[in-house]
Amino acid sequence: MSADEATFCDGVCYAKPCFEDSVNTQLQYLIELQKFDLRIFQILDQQKKIPGLLQAAEAPLRELQGRLQAMKHEGESLARQRKNAELELGSQEAQLQKVRARLSELKTNKEYQAHLFEIELARKKKDTFEEAVLALMERSDQNSQAIKELELQVEEAQKNFESEKAKLDKHAADLTNEIAQLDQEQKQISQSLEQSLLSRYNRLKTIRKGFAVAEIRDGSCIGCRLQLPPQLVAEVRRGDQLLDCSYCRRILYMANQLETESTE
């Protein structure tokens, strides 16, 4: 390769493209291709977020379902406690009746007084179990009411989640369809690019998430926002070759190149 066929900038050799189209035409293809690629990368990012959005949409439902399950477990526990308390109450009532039945067998006043004390203790014990049963009945009723209210909330949350899921599913399908269309349009434009330039662009877009071609504004690359060497800016302004940014390696262009092409 002769000196006329290559340009050296910052120690890097950039070969002049041998395009049938002009450099500016190839640049137009690159910029158009980049529009599709930037949108594709944006869609890919959105697709990655969909599972998280789905989980977030389902979170209220899961929280309510967890509370409902805990409430039902509590209801089962209360039912067991109530059953045991009722058994104890029944046993204590039977014991009280048995103690009272012995009154007729007593012969002395001392025995009678002692037995009355025993009856009082048995009655207090029965009353304690009776109060426990009543308290458990009240708690069971409150639990049942809370379960009914939670079931309504779960039903509503289920509807909301299914609605949100349907929206996300449609959004995911729309993104899939859009990316398929973009891929097709991208392939058509890619066919218009010189193969080595396309390979160069594809390497950059992978590294830069689709942002492979950057405009120079006020002497800076808008890709990395760094000031470029004046010699490089001047060479890009000439528009006879496609050069890279000295720092981020994006393919550089200036707005006047596109304006020139559009007026020709």
Image (cartoon, helix red, strand yellow):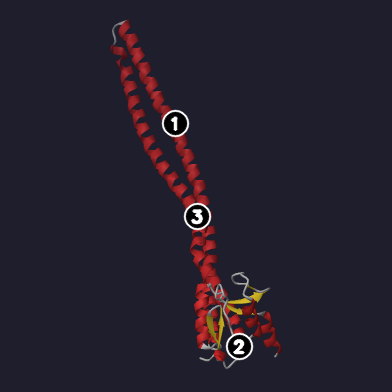
Q: Nearer the viewer, mark 1 or mark 3?
A: 3
Quarter placement of the C terminus: bottom right
First along the sequence among labels 3 and 2: 2
Q: Residue at x 37, y 32 (%)?
A: 85
Which residue of the protein is positioned furthest toward the bottom in this rendering? 20
Q: Is residue 127 visible?
A: yes
Q: Secondary structure at mark 1?
A: helix
First along the sequence among labels 1 and 2: 2
- Counting other residues with Cα less than 10 Å from the Cα at mark 1, is it few (<14), some (14-19), or many (20 or more)? some
Of 2 and 111, the residue lying toward us: 2
Q: Are marks 3 and 2 in contact (CB under 8 Å)?
A: no
What's the residue type where badge 1 is placed? Leu
Of 101 and 247, the residue lying toward us: 247
**Distance (Cα) linking label 1 and label 2:** 91 Å
Q: Nearer the viewer, mark 3 or mark 2?
A: 2
**Distance (Cα) linking label 1 and label 3:** 37 Å
Which residue of the protein is positioned furthest toward the top in this rendering? 109
Q: Which residue is mark 2?
A: 23
Q: Position of residue 116 (x, y in %)?
A: 35, 13
- Tell me which corner region of the image, top left, top right, bottom left or bottom right, holds residue 214: bottom right
Which residue of the protein is positioned furthest toward the right in this rendering? 263
**Distance (Cα) linking label 3 and label 2:** 54 Å
Q: Which residue is mark 1?
A: 134
Q: Is residue 187 visible?
A: no
What's the residue type where badge 2 is placed? Val
What's the residue type where badge 3 is placed? Ala
Q: Nearer the viewer, mark 1 or mark 2?
A: 2
**Is residue 115 found left or right of 190 in the rendered image?**
left
Q: Are marks 1 and 2 in contact (CB under 8 Å)?
A: no
Q: Which residue is mark 3?
A: 59
